[in-house]
Image (spheres, helix red, strand yellow):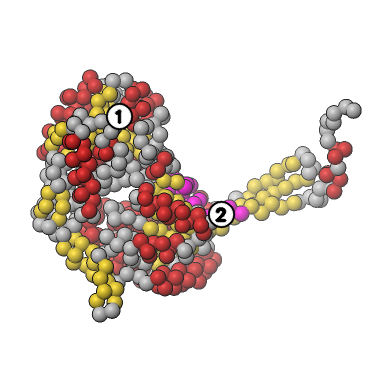
């Protein structure tokens, strides 16, 4: 929420556990975004010139500094998001991300000297050398569901590549920025090329006007605006947007394990993840047994209230999301779905909560099966044939990730290969969040641009320059003579 106090613009952030707007911060002015961008641009050439080895040491020093301030960052992040364990996971993951890129960057960014290459037309020897030229200033606009992770997941490889990084976190979860900025005091050379600007969408728009490349994580609606703004400036845009991830459960699956996988994949972070399982398709012969087991286990999970260190399901970070979830549940019930467990939006301590919800008898004309839910809701639908299941899984405008669970990998893989999504988990759910190594691209409205996962994801932040060297005499001018053609039609 934005207010004006004594002529100064202020914004407030709400603690999702209490519903209280208890954090006040000053958003960046538009002129400040430009000034920050200019400062980062001025420092970037020196950051690049010091060489890859020095940049790696700076990233490792930042990892150490974050570890040293770990508790302060976790505490602030837990007030942003209302959860403790996942806040620990995010901060520790940021440290691992820094150290991971410190290990990967030398191989990915090394200069390659190739040759000789013989060209039979030129009759000469040509060598070429590749150079990686980073974008001078890369911009990052991140969402509220994983504030630390998604602020740094792309910025770190960009920094390793030699780019400067301008980051706009969500105004809904800004508290972590203050303690994170303090860690940069221990790494002054890195502090010179990392900047944070706080504010709402207008600040995100201003950021796009200042950078050479933009990475955005968030909704499809906002992603369209980012892509359009980037296209007008003719700069690259890397977008990871929404998801409506399916899981297909075949009759050969171990149902107890399948239930655990689906619950973890659909309810982690209270379902507030773009790769949450949001559609569950179960072969009809085992549907009723699976549904009963899923409902029983989901109903036994507890809310993370009142003790932040206890329970399974945290609050809804952004309160308006509760209205979206409630609307989708009501729409499903109106159209014939039934509740197995959960189904209500609750208020505890001023925060909004949604207990684990399992819906049965859902169909594809319901919003719950078409639109991103971003909450702990698992709609379950029966299918008869594998072909039907694949068609249902692909009946979506999204294509981020998904899963197939069967009695064996050999049975599941051919099904997964036919699902239009970038990351498919086999005999489990949401494996894409457990490893950064496999490359994958978004399908449909789930995004565009190069893979943000895998070692090659650093290539998004560089342009490859080829220096092609002639080691012999240049080709003679008569190479252009038409009579040199090896075959001519007879006249």
Vertical placement of residue 31 versus 301, above or below: below
Would residue 450 be counted in the magenta stretch? Answer: yes
Say which residue appears at 25% left-offset and 71% top-offset.
3
Which residue is drawn at the image coordinates 44% and 73% (left, top)? Answer: 35
Q: Is residue 117 left or right of 52 when viewed as pictured?
A: right
Name the residue at the bottom extreme.
Answer: 6
Would you say residue 190 sits in the magenta stretch? Answer: no
What is the x, y in percent for residue 194?
Answer: 41, 66
Q: Residues within 10 Å of mark 2 (few under 14, many from 20)?
A: few
Q: Which residue is mark 1?
A: 248
Q: What span is in magenta?
A: 449-465
Snapshot quadrant of residue 203:
bottom left
Q: Position of residue 308 (x, y in %)?
A: 14, 54
Closer-to-camera residue (46/229): 229
Residue sticking out furthest to the front: 334
Picture coordinates of residue 82 (x, y %)?
19, 56
Which residue is pictured at 24% across the width and 76% down the height?
5
Q: Report how far apart the C-alphas of labels 2 and 1 lie in the structure.
A: 40 Å
At mark 1, the secondary structure is strand
Q: Which residue is label 2 attached to?
A: 463
Q: Is residue 271 shown above or below 225?
A: above
Q: Nearer the viewer, residue 470 or 220?
A: 220
Q: Position of residue 182 (x, y in %)?
A: 32, 69
* Mark 2 or 1, closer to the camera: 1
Q: Secondary structure at mark 2?
A: strand
Tell me which numbered mark, 2 or 1, is placed earlier along the sequence.
1
Q: Is any part of residue 295 visible from this angle?
A: no
């Amino acid at each position: 929420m934005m207010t004006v106090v004594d002529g100064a613009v202020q914004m407030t952030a709400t603690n999702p556990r209490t519903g209280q707007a208890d954090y006040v911060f000053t958003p960046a002015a538009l002129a400040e975004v430009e000034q920050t961008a200019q400062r980062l641009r001025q420092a970037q050439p020196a950051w690049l010139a010091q060489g890859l080895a020095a940049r790696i040491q700076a990233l490792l020093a930042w990892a150490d500094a974050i570890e040293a301030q770990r508790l302060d960052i976790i505490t602030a992040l837990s007030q942003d998001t209302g959860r403790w364990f996942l806040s620990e996971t995010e901060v520790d993951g940021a440290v691992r991300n820094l150290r991971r890129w410190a290990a990967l960057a030398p191989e990915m960014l090394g200069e390659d000297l190739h040759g000789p290459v013989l060209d039979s037309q030129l009759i000469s020897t040509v060598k070429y050398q590749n150079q990686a030229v980073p974008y001078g200033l890369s911009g990052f606009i991140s969402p509220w569901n994983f504030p630390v992770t998604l602020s740094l997941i792309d910025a770190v490889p960009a920094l390793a590549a030699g780019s400067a990084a301008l980051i706009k976190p969500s105004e809904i979860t800004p508290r972590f920025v203050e303690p994170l900025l303090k860690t940069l005091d221990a790494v002054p050379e890195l502090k010179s090329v990392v900047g944070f600007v706080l504010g709402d969408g207008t600040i995100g728009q201003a950021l796009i006007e200042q950078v050479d490349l933009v990475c955005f994580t968030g909704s499809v609606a906002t992603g369209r605006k980012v892509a359009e703004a980037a296209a007008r400036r003719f700069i690259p845009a890397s977008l990871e947007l929404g998801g409506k991830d399916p899981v297909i459960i075949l009759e050969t699956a171990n149902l107890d394990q399948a239930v655990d996988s689906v619950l973890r994949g659909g309810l982690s972070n209270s379902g507030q993840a773009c790769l949450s399982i949001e559609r569950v398709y179960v072969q009809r012969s085992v549907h009723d047994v699976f549904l009963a087991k899923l409902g029983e286990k989901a109903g036994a999970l507890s809310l993370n209230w009142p003790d932040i260190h206890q329970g399974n399901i945290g609050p809804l970070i952004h309160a308006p999301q509760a209205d979206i979830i409630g609307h989708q549940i009501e729409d499903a019930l109106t159209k014939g779905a039934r509740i197995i467990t959960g189904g209500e939006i609750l208020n505890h301590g001023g925060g909004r909560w949604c207990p684990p919800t399992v819906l049965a008898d859902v169909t594809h004309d319901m919003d719950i099966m078409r639109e991103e839910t971003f909450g702990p809701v698992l709609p379950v639908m029966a299918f008869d044939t594998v072909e039907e299941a694949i068609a249902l899984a692909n009946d979506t405008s999204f294509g981020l990730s998904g899963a197939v669970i069967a009695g064996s990998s050999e049975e599941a893989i051919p099904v997964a290969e036919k699902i239009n999504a970038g990351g498919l988990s086999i005999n489990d759910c949401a494996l894409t969040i457990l490893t950064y190594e496999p490359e994958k691209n978004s399908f449909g409205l789930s995004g565009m641009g190069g893979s943000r996962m895998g070692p090659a994801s650093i290539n998004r932040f560089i342009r490859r320059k080829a220096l092609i060297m002639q080691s012999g005499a240049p080709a003679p001018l008569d190479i252009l003579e038409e009579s040199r053609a090896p075959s001519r039609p007879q006249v």
